[in-house]
Image (cartoon, rainbow, N blue to C red):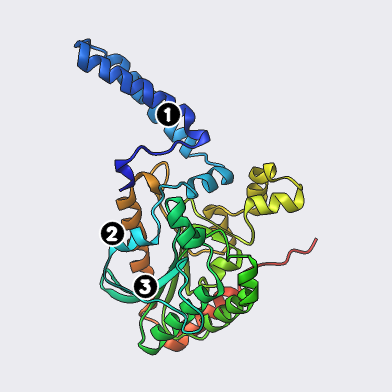
Amino acid sequence: MAEARPIATLEFEKPLADLECRLEELRKISGKQKISVEAEISALSEKLTAARREIYGNLTPWQRVQIVRHPQRPYLLDYLRLAATDVVELGGDRAYGDDRALIGGLATLGSHRVVFLGHQKGRDTKENLLRNFGCAHPEGYRKALRLMRLADRFQLPIISFIDTPGAFPGVPSEERHIAEAIAVNIREMFTFRVPIVAVVIGEGGSGGALGIGVANRVLILENGYYSVISPEGCASILWKDRAFAPQAAEALRISSIDLKELGLVDDIVPEPEGGAHRDWETTVANTLKKITQHLTELSQLSPTRLLETRQERYRSIGSVTEA
């Protein structure tokens, strides 16, 4: 578990880290030297609580992006280990190979037997090279399509876990037609007659996210983001400088609150104070609860109505304002 290791401190969390260090020193002094410093400990604890409430209650979009990229955040395999049973991973696209950046298979979530899909990142250099930093190749999306067709054939709900900065943009991807693979997935996901729930558990970047993201319900974790481009990519285009990423994150309106207001996501999954990396169990439990809630509601709809509501959802996105 992430909690067993020291949690890396983000730049904006340094004032909290300083207070935590001072509090720990006071407790050590109290224990070793038998000196009563309860009043000082109590005052410092209150100050730390107030500081946490101030910082985490007023996070900027860029600070949320930093939280969602935290290296100790739970990834898809962690969700499956903590929340799913009877997990059977299925590999290969039956055409080229098996992409380890996008995995899928069968699992039981709560009382629902489902087909799961999702991006998987790595925690160290070796694993990140294996998982290609969560950036899937065309064969990953074709594998996902094969599994979704399997779900449709056997009338199993589809649960999609999105966590990618984007599909892999390199030459091998272009040679194997990444744009076509994503486009086909988007088209085909409008035809499946089973409930589809997509959850943005981390980064939701561009077509790489949308390639498995067409759903009846789209959920997002509190600190997740869902955007056509990363803040750094946007800053490079508009300001010619990646240093303007914080301003880009603000302008893109990529935070969960903005996305809910714009109608791009249907529900927000709350995270523990400070981010999902601080409490995996609570994060996974909250996510499973939301998935089960929406899956239960969707299970009451007929296959025809599932298709209609999915199409209506995407047709209703966007608005035109005339001066």
Which of disc 1 and disc 2 is earlier in sequence? 1
Q: Is residue 198 above or below residue 26?
A: below
- Identify the residue shown where x is 43% and y is 35%: 53
- Does any portion of residue 160 appear in the rendered image? no
Res 7 → quadrant:
top left
- Identify the amino acid type marked 2: Leu
Q: Position of residue 54 (x, y in %)?
A: 47, 33
Residue toward you, 93 or 79: 93
- Identify the amino acid type marked 3: Leu
Q: Nearer the viewer, mark 3 or mark 2?
A: 2
**Label 2 vs label 1: CA separation?**
29 Å
- Identify the residue shown where x is 43% and y is 56%: 127
For disc 3, the marked residue is 295
For disc 1, the marked residue is 17
Which of disc 1 and disc 3 is earlier in sequence? 1
- Identify the residue shown where x is 47% and y is 56%: 128
- Identify the residue shown where x is 47% and y is 71%: 99
Q: Is residue 242 above or below residue 140?
A: above
For disc 2, the marked residue is 82
> What element does badge 2 sit on?
helix
> What element does badge 3 sit on?
helix
- Identify the amino acid type marked 1: Ala
**Label 3 vs label 2: CA separation?**
19 Å
Residue toward you, 104 or 40: 104
Q: Position of residue 255 (x, y in %)?
A: 55, 52
